Image (cartoon, grey):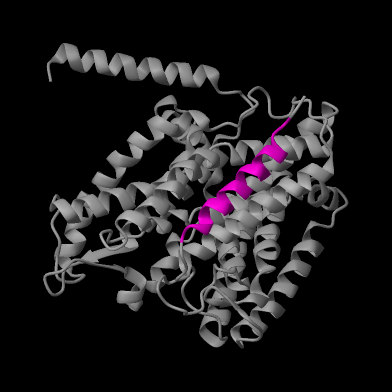
Amino acid sequence: MTRSAADSGGTEAAGLSARIEAATAPERDRYLDLLRVAAIMMVILGHWVVRVVVVPEGEAQAGYLLALQPEWQWASLIWQVMPVIFLVGGALNARSWRRAQSDGVAPVAWVRRRADRLLGPTVPFLLVLVPGWVVAELLVPDALLIDPGVALIPLWFVAAYLAVMALTPVTLALHARGWSLPAILAAVAVAALLDLMRLAEWGPVLGTQPLIGLPNFLLIWGAIHQMGHMWADDRLPTRPGGQAGLALAGAGAMALLIGAGNWPLTMVPVEGTTLPNNAAPPTVALFALALVQTGLALLARARLKRVLERPWVWTPVALLGARMLTLFLWHQVAMVVVTNLAVQQGWLPLTETVDARWWAQQPLWVAAFSIMLLGLVLLFGRFEGGSAGGSEDGVSDRVGWGWTLAGIALTGGAIAGLLWLGVSDQPVWPALGFLALFIAGTRALRPRG
């Protein structure tokens, strides 16, 4: 590269940073954006690395790292960072709903607008993935090493976050009355009771886990979201000693639950097995991990907020944050497409087992996945931000709670059905019916003036 080209590139980068800096509102909490972006990037990288392709006997086989090498399950204590997303969501939803209240926006209108922002990018994702999945199963059922249904995994977050977000007007009202801590303790206590029943294998099984644990999706993620309300009002520890104490309390609780109790070690599902885990459905051990992550995030906040004032640091955070949901939804699609093509065409090297050479080759696979994901984001990123455009708090929406609750029920039920098909040995054609239900739900939730 010539010096003039380098200078030109540096000038363009500086200009981009200047434009992003000028467009960033002074009151924006850049640290919350950093937490979201860092968490999503860790999730993406983790999902890519745990997907194992080896050739033990000359034929490519797909597996899951935590099942093939259970000793790596401890790493999920570091890479399970979805609690950070719900914590940040609780803080941002609190601020957004308060702005909406000050503008005279009805609770139902606010919920519908936030739902539209969440579901907008999900519609094209499913319109591409579901028909492609059905066609692949009909035409080449045995040709794909990794089933396209794997790419449905991110949908659980859409359903869980939609439900928790829709409760914000209620949970924030509890918070305003000083009831956040009692509400969190009550949710965790009920979740612990359900954990004990689930770990005792009480009741019918859904997928790979007892159905009794299903309410914990709302209880645990809702409790973490409620902590986000406390973050928004600085009601969490503000001094380093208290912040470190929060992290240590969470670590101690995890040690007791996992070490002395019957709770499993892994914080993520172990695909291909019926082993219990702390994420699907979430357990009180996952809430303890959330306490650790919250304490550490509070400890790092002051220093990192100063660093984020530098435009060259803030620019990548802002760019990734603007397409965060698109990145999350499509990253498994990138992995499925690249892996199947690479194995069939021999584009990337394979090993006989998970050994040092396998680990050394992972940067090549991650780079290939990243290139494909970049293309998908460029193609589908324009759908992020919702269908109505404009200010999320200033939308005039004349539809009431009936249509809103129906929309939430339809989208949630459709996602549950799709995820069930993804983990069960069933024909995939019903996915088209679940797709129709999902679209009907999004239409019911779309803001209308």
Q: Is residue 427 above or below residue 95?
A: below
Extreme residue in the front direction: 138
Along the viewing direction, whichever of 36 and 369 lies nearer the viewer: 369
* Left or right, residue 178 beside residue 62: right
Q: Residue at x 78, y 61 (%)?
A: 181
Q: Is residue 62 above or below residue 124?
A: below
> Can you say which quadrant of the picture contains the N terminus?
top left
Residue 273 rendering spot, x and y as whole percentages = 42, 77
Q: Is residue 273 above or below residue 405?
A: below
> Can you say which quadrant of the picture contains the C terminus?
top right
Q: Residue at x 43, y 72 (%)?
A: 270
Along the viewing direction, whichever of 137 and 103 lies nearer the viewer: 137
User: Is residue 433 shown in magenta?
Assistant: yes
Q: What span is in magenta?
A: 428-447
Along the viewing direction, whichever of 36 and 196 lies nearer the viewer: 196
Residue 301 rendering spot, x and y as whole percentages = 55, 45
Residue 322 rendering spot, x and y as whole percentages = 50, 32
Q: Quadrant of residue 244?
A: bottom right
* Left or right, residue 379 beside residue 146: right
Q: Is residue 313 visible?
A: no
Q: Main secondary structure of the magenta part?
A: helix
* Left or right, residue 2 beside residue 310: left
User: Is residue 384 shown in magenta?
Assistant: no
Residue 117 rendering spot, x and y as whole percentages = 62, 36
Q: Residue at x 55, y 87 (%)?
A: 260
Q: Is residue 69 above or below residue 184?
A: below
Q: Is residue 344 visible?
A: yes
Extreme residue in the right direction: 177
